[in-house]
Image (cartoon, grey):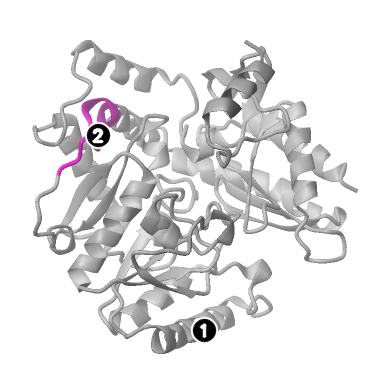
Amino acid sequence: MSHADLLARHRQVMPSWLGLYYEQPIEIVRGSGCRVTDAEGREYLDFFAGILTNMLGYDVPEVRAAIEAQVATGVLHTSTLYLIGNQVELAEKIAERSGIPDAKVFFTASGSEAIEAALLLCTQYRQSNSILALRNSYHGRSFATMAVTGNRGWSASSLSPVNVSYAQSGYRYRSSFGHLDDAAFIEACSADLREVIDTTTARDVACLIAEPIQGVGGFTVPPDGLLGAYQDILLEQDILYVSDEVQTGWGRTGEHFWGYQAHGVAPDVLTFAKGLGNGLTIAGIVARAEVMDCLSANSISTFGGNPLSTAAGLATLAYLTSHDLQANAHKIGGQLLAGLRDLVDSVPAVGDVRGKGLMIGVELVRPGTKTPDTTAAARVLEATREAGLLIGKGGLYGNVLRIAPPLTLTDADAAQGLQILRTALTDLT
């Protein structure tokens, strides 16, 4: 079936608000390593990894073997009403790596559900529905996660089950404090957070939730230490800190296993998702036992931590650590950043290049201004696809190219993708 025929069927039965990339959307039907093939036989180098989810790439033998072994048992699902060995083993490994003392783990089926669970725990523990979030943030598409999302393009409703106040995010390129050096920037943002708490809350805040690097917001990177300065303020009032590691977790930033570790913070709750299952649905939260166990009502999870997804999660985590993919993300990400940053000076449409590890954002603007150029971003998205490279797009205004390949990306594939990107961006001049 052609892409055009499938698109026509898609439009008949799928929601109009379900976004698709490209003027002529494609279906990906095969993959190996960091390369995929579409339904019409065209091969691409994948620099977006299913929105950072195919963390190891495609057709990884160790993950496939783990999935096949679980399928061979005939048991794909049981629910949390029964003990699940894979679930307990994976929870033990995640708790140990979380950096949270006395940690307990709860598995969900998506990042949005994980954030919902984190908000439930914090509001119940603190007996308050007051939440602090960051401007330009994204935390999911469900009701409460949209409420704490500070990005109007992804907030489909003004209705909310929580009261939210928004602090500075560390989006230096568009911040009113962006002209300050790191220390002064952190000081100004911290003063702003104090003012937000004093003027917009009843001072009984449940938690602050933050992405260490904002994903959908355009891979915006705050100065190291900003979130640590925020937590110093939170601790004065016993406000919990939630680190949304859905996109920054598992070593993707290169420097650390979790994004929060760049800031000297000690989260009370941590959320994870995406890459752990290398394509299978798995997510969850880690929390201090006191916080995790604060619920008094009964609860279960139908799909969270099921035998199949946790089998894949165990294999993925083992591969990640045994191949030191965090180090690879640091090395290859550094090469990509170095190869893109000089374009800020040579290509007027490139306003900013930022990132850590294999999370890189390229913000496009109208030459000579900081005015977001969504048309240019769309042009580059199409040009890179035509040249055989898949990338992402995001940011508050939809003008940021998002580059987040599998953590297994090789030097050769990185060089090829970088050349395609440089050509597409240079052609904007």
**Mark 1 vs mark 2: in front:** 2
- The residue that appears at 16% across and 32% down in the rendered structure is 79
Name the mark on residue 303.
2
Is 286 rendered above or below residue 191?
above
Residue 205: quarter of image: bottom left
Q: Could you tell me which secondary element the residue under label 2 belongs to?
A: loop
**Badge 1: how crowded within 10 Å, few (<14), some, or many (20+)?**
some
- The residue that appears at 80% across and 48% down in the rendered structure is 376
The amino acid at mark 2 is Phe
| CA distance for labels 1 and 2 | 44 Å
Q: For the N terminus, which image quadrant?
A: top right
Residue segment shown in magenta: 300-311
Name the mark on residue 237.
none
Q: Report whether 358 appears left or right of 347.
A: left
Q: Position of residue 30 (x, y in %)?
A: 54, 16
Residue 363: quarter of image: bottom right
Q: Residue furthest right?
A: 429
Name the mark on residue 187.
1
Are the residues tagged 1 and 2 within 8 Å (C-beta)?
A: no
Q: Position of residue 384 (x, y in %)?
A: 74, 34
Q: Position of residue 39 (x, y in %)?
A: 62, 14
